[in-house]
Each structure stands twice: as structure tokens, then as C-alpha cells.
Amino acid sequence: MMISETAARRRNLLISIIRGILKENYEVTREYTVSEIETIFHFRKRDIAYNLDYLFDQRDEKYILKTKKLKEVQKIIRNHHQVFGQLETAKVLFIKSFGRFYDDRKNSASFSFNHERLRKIYSDLQPVIPILHWGMLPILSKWLMINSGRLPENDIIDFYDHYDMLTALLNEIRGRGETMETKGDNTLNKEMTFSVYTRRWGHADVYRIERTIDGWEVHHIAINGKCAKDGEGALMNNLHHDGIFFPEDGVKYALSNLWDDAEAGNVTTEELQKKLQQIADWISSVEKAVGENQPDWVNYY
């Protein structure tokens, strides 16, 4: 089964909604403003644009869970309440078994990964795993779901049949689990500069660039417009238009990763500007180097 990034995100959003409802003791049929959805359920601006209508129906200026999602939420909340009284005992059992295995591996330089021991631990913990999952309702790394091709609620025991998934449960127990961050919104729509040297003009051109929910918005004399998070679109078109020689695949990789880091809230606005210029400086250095010793009569690059 293929799990897309969108499916993984929507799973986490649904769990975040449930956690918010439980924390605030709301009725599942409560209506919310967009601002409340952002604040209580930790929706990013991108989530509002692409996932709000998937999870909610609009009623005038407010939103209510879609009927299908409401039933799903009610079912998960029932599961949560059914196991909650057993949660603390389950945590202790999990730490004593898998927690000890994890700590042995982490703290011993000579530790040899014992697959048989892990299989025995996993087998013994199968009655405990659903209690932990429904009791804690963990937010999970999208990569655990994407790489495994599974969503935990579809088959909990099967999903946690892996060291990394068990580690995610352990981190949740120890207060180091994944969280729903909205700090990435702080770097949206902030104008920054992207200064690139071009041999065509013999000086640096300064692009104005903003991070958007879909990628980047680029402003320049020649070409203005949107581009994907890897720069495909207006940014790449500008660089090609000026005949700039640069490692395109590497630059796209860098821009895409930087966009993801910013969206996840891992960089501040100042750090985003600094890293954007580092990419631009990389482009400039390659552009200068490729023409440095090229004979004038060649004029290939």
C-alpha cells in the first residue's frame, strides 16, 4: 500500500483534532472558526488551504467536522476512553521491555543488535501496544507512514512491527514524541534577497524571493512569478534566461530541503535568508569558475 505525504499529514491532523477536543473537553459537533482551528488543532496555513475542506464542512463563517470524519473521531475517542485506565501500567511494561532494549543499544558501544530478542519483546508487547496507541494518540513522523506504506489506525499491531515504530512509542512515553508545529508559518510571505553573479552582465543580480505555501514567489527584472519548492518555475527560468551555469539538480535539492525545513519550523526567518544566500553563493561560485579559464574564442559556457 502506498501512503502519500498528504495522507500521512491528514492522519496527523485528524489525531491533532482529537487531542484538541479531548484537551478542551469539546463536543465533537462543535463549530470552529478558522482561527480556532489554527490555534487549537495546530493547522498551518498550508493545511487551511489544502486540508480544511477535506476534514470540515463550512457553515456560514464557521466549520464543523464532516459526518464521515465525525464518526471516525467518535470511534477513536471511544477507543481512547476504553484504554485510558490501563495506560500508566502499559507505559511501565513497555519501558521495562522495549525501553531497556533501546537504552542498552543506545548506551553500549559494544551492543549487538539482537533481532531474536526484539522479536520476543514485540510479541510480548502485542497486548500492550493498542493500549499505548489509543491511550496516547501519538503524532507520528510522516516518514514512518510513508516508508512503511501503512497508517497505524488501519492495523495497529502490524504498524508497530518495527524498531523505529516502537521507538516512536517510547519517545511519546518519555515526552519526546512528535508534535504539531505551526512555527513554519512565521517564515511565509517574508521578502528576502537572492543575490547571484552572472557572467552575462558581469555583476550580481538581486532577486526578491518569498516562501509561499506552495513553494517560492520570485521577483526580478526579467521573469516574475511562482515556482515549486525546488525552484522549478520562475527562479530556474531566470537563471536559464541569463545563461548561468550551475549544478541544477543540487540547487533544486537544496531549495526543496530548505523549504521543508522552513515549513516544519526548523529555521527562523533570519536563518532562512542566510541559507537562501548560501545557495545563491554556491550558484555564483560555479558560474564564475566555469568561465574563469575558458578561452575567449570557445565561448561555450
Image (tube, grey):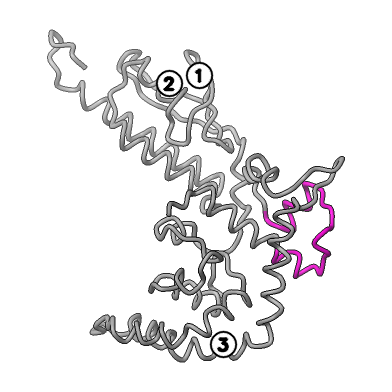
Q: Is residue 160 above or below residue 217?
A: below
Q: Residue at (71%, 70%) from the top-left corner?
A: 77
What is the span of residues highlighted in magenta in the rendered image? Answer: 18-42
Task: Give the CA separation, mark 2 to mark 3.
Answer: 60 Å
Instruction: Say whether residue 79 is left or right of residue 106.
Output: right
Residue for badge 3: 90
Q: Residues within 10 Å of mark 1 (few under 14, many from 20)?
A: some
What's the mark number on residue 21? none
Asked if residue 45 is among those painted magenta in the image, a careful observer would answer no
Q: Is residue 125 above or below residue 272?
A: below
Q: Are marks 1 and 2 in contact (CB under 8 Å)?
A: yes
Residue 27 screen position, x and y as percent: 83, 64
Secondary structure at badge 1 equals: loop
Instruction: Say whether residue 248 is left or right of residue 186.
Output: left
Residue for badge 1: 220
Q: Quadrant of the N terminus?
A: bottom left
Q: Quadrant of residue 245?
A: top left
Nearer the N terminus, badge 1 or badge 2? Answer: 2
Residue 275 screen position, x and y as percent: 44, 42
Q: Residue at (35%, 35%) from the top-left corner?
A: 251
What's the mark number on residue 205? 2
Residue 281 screen position, x and y as percent: 36, 34
Asked if residue 30 is among those painted magenta in the image, a careful observer would answer yes
The residue under label 3 is which amino acid type? Answer: Ala
Q: Residue at (75%, 53%) from the top-left corner?
A: 67
